[in-house]
Image (cartoon, grey):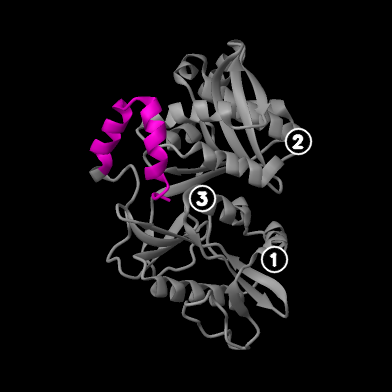
Amino acid sequence: MPTELPQGHASVPASAAGEVRIRAASSNDAARWDAFVLTHPEATFFHRIGWKRVIEQAFGHRSHYLLAERAGAIVGVLPLVEIKSRLFGHSLGSLPFCAYGGIVAADADARRGLDQAAQALARTLKVGALEYRNQVAQHADWPAKDLYVTFKKAIEPEAEANMNAIPRKQRAMVRKGIKAGLTGEIDHDTTRFFQAYSASVHRLGTPVFSRKFFQLLKDEFGDHCEVLTIVLGEQVIASVMSFYFRDEVLPYYGGGVDAARAVAGNDFMYWELMRRACERGLKVFDFGRSKRGTGSFDFKKNWGFEPTPLHYEYFLVSDSEVPEINPLNPKYRLFIQAWKKMPLAVANVIGPHIVKNLG
C-alpha cells in the first residue's frame, strides 16, 4: 500500500509487509494522537499534538505532523516543524522550542516508515537539515550534536526526604529562601510569570519569547501547564512555568527579577515546585535540558541531579555541516553583550521577532 503525505510532498515505500501507512495528521486525529502519546513509554509532553497549534499561532511556522497507522490504529507519530529564516536558515525538526522530540513508534516498521517519510519530506522542502531531538540515539551514522543533557530524578514520597536529598550547600540556599519569608502562589494567567522570566533572560543576553506564546501554552494545555510564582509580600521574586505529563513535572521556563538573588528566589522556587509535586504524588522531577559548560548545567548539578546526554541527530540535505544556532557559538558573542545593554522594554518588543526563528 503506498503511503500518503501532504499534497505536493514526495511519497515513500510502505513497510515490506504493506501494513503501515504514513500520512499527515488532521484535526480529526487529535484525540487519537494524544491517546497514543499518553500510553507510549518513550513519548514526552512535547509529543502532544497541542504543540502544533501553539507553534503555528505563536510563530507562524508550518507544521508537518505525521502519523503511522496499521489497520486503522495509530502505531507511531512524528511531530515536525519547518522554520524558514533569512538569518538562521531553513530547517525541519522534531521539535523546535522543545527539549525532546523524534519518532515515537510501536514497532520497527512504523519507526522506519516515519523516518523515511521525514527524510523524503526534508528533501522535497529543500531544507538545510532534518533534526531529531532524541533521548536515545537512533542514527549512529548521522552527524550529532553533543551539547545538551537532561536532568531527571525520582521524587521521594515524603517532603523531608526530598529536602535531605539536596546536597548541603544547595540545601542551605533553599533554607535561605524559606527564612526570607518567600511563599509560592499558583497563577491562572502569565502576567507575573512574564515579568520575572523576561527580566531573567534579558540578563543572560537572550531574546525573550512573546507574551502570546506563553498564554497560548497555558490556554492549550490547561492544568497540565502551571505557573508557580514566588513572592515576598506583594513583590514578585521569581516564577516558573511547568508542564505535567503522566507522573512527571517539568519546570521548563523560569526566572527571577534582580531581587531574587539576595533572597535565593530561584532556589526556593524549584524547591517549592518539588515540594508541591511530592504532595501531589508525582514520581519524577524533570529539570529539563541544559547546555554543557553553562550556569544552568552547574545549577542543576548542585541539586544532586546527574546529567544524561541528549542525542540531537541531523540528516543533512543542503547543509554541509551541523547547524550551530546557540548562544555558545562565538559568532553570537557580540550580539549577546549588546542585548544585555538594551533597555528591557525595548528587548521585550524586538526579542520575539528574533527568537521565533531560533527553534
Q: Nearer the viewer, residue 109 or 198?
A: 198
Measured from the top left, where is residue 70 in percent x and y?
A: 69, 79
Residue at the disc numbered 3: 98
Measured from the top left, where is residue 136 in percent x and y?
A: 52, 60
Residue 288 visible in the shown view = yes
Residue at the disc numbered 1: 28
Residue 190 sits in quarter: top right
Q: Marks 1 and 3: in contact by CB < 8 Å?
A: no
Residue at the disc numbered 2: 280
What segment carries the magenta color? 332-359
Dot 2 or dot 3: first in sequence order is: 3
- Position of residue 260 relative to residue 156, above or below, is above
Measured from the top left, where is residue 150 in percent x and y?
A: 51, 46
Q: Marks 2 and 1: in contact by CB < 8 Å?
A: no
Q: Residue at x 67, y 72 (%)?
A: 75
| SS at circle 3 | loop
Disc 1 marks a residue whose amino acid type is Asn
Measured from the top left, where is residue 9 in percent x and y?
A: 47, 77
